[in-house]
Image (cartoon, rainbow, N blue to C red):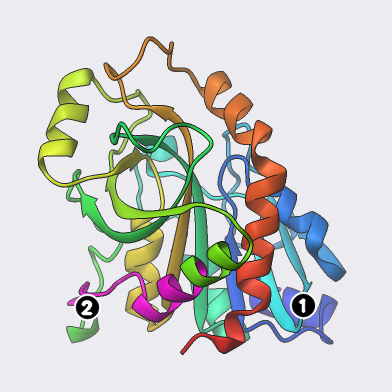
Amino acid sequence: MNALDTITQRAARIQPTIALVLGSGWGGLTDHLTDAIQIPYTDLDGFPQPTVAGHSPTLWLGQLGAQSVAVMGGRKHGYETGAVDAMALPLKVLHALGCHTLVQTNAAGSVRADMPQQSLMVLSDHLNLPQRSPLIGLNGNERFVNMVDAYDPALRKHAVHIAQAKGAMLFEGVYAWYLGPQFETPAEIRMAKLLGADAVGMSTVPETILARHLGMRVLALSFITNFGAGMSQENLSHAHTLQQAQAGSAQASRLLADIVASLGHAH
């Protein structure tokens, strides 16, 4: 049975319109779901098996307020296999289920001195530094995707409005994608800053390209776990990233839940 049929069979009463992809430290969002159904990726034909700590290979379907949502507890990164299209099938399935909006989250490093760890940033744009695309190999004119306003301006405005209403600080900035898995060098961080980046990370951009190809609106949020290499005395490691992400997980997940629950008001 294909993944779409499995989901519609097991979660027939839920018709999601918003898809979420949870990055490191954002797993607490599932605590806010009501009437939730869980389906392990192993039961979903073609869904990837993440190999990174902090990513749960589970699809959740449920409610966030009045919104019906599908939540991917983890993603497959380009650095895991070298392929940057591993999220193509899951996003295609969620779109076929009825999801017209993709909300992405990640853990990222800051290249701004005024945006310290534990900050939250909504993406306004991105830099595809590896110049890799998940659309390579596709045919037809649809592959020539317009990436202006890839991160939907109305959704960004809504996120900032909700954050302000909740008394939370939400930065806005450009996310620079590095393929990884190694962390960036201090020189690469300086380059990213010169190019106009506010944060750096190893995910999100391929999914944004895929979602825009499908015609989905995109909102993306970064949880800042560290300063970029060379900006502080921090010893960068994945363990440090997870520790910082988990320390702020409850607050970040609560704000994300509030933003998504009220997305019906964003046009």
Q: Over which residues does the magenta segment extend?
A: 143-159
Q: Residue furthest right?
A: 35
User: What element does badge 2 sit on?
Assistant: loop
The answer to whether residue 200 is seen in the rendering is yes
In the figure, is residue 228 to the left or right of 40? left
Q: Is residue 166 magenta?
A: no
Percent of width and height locating residue 114: 34, 36
User: What element does badge 1 sit on?
Assistant: loop
Q: Nearer the viewer, residue 154 or 37?
A: 154
The residue shown at (38%, 84%) is 215
Percent of width and height locating residue 53: 62, 31
> Which quarter shows the N terminus?
bottom right
In the figure, is residue 257 to the left or right of 204? right
Mark 1: amino acid = Gly
In the figure, is residue 54 to the left or right of 82? right
Percent of width and height locating residue 10: 84, 76
Q: Nearer the viewer, residue 139 or 142?
A: 142
Query: Disc 1 or 2, which lies upstream in sequence?
Result: 1
Using the numbered discs, state the Cα–Cα distance from disc 1 to disc 2 in whole angstroms. 39 Å
Q: Which residue is mark 1?
A: 65
Instruction: Tell me, for residue 139, which label it has, or none.
Output: 2
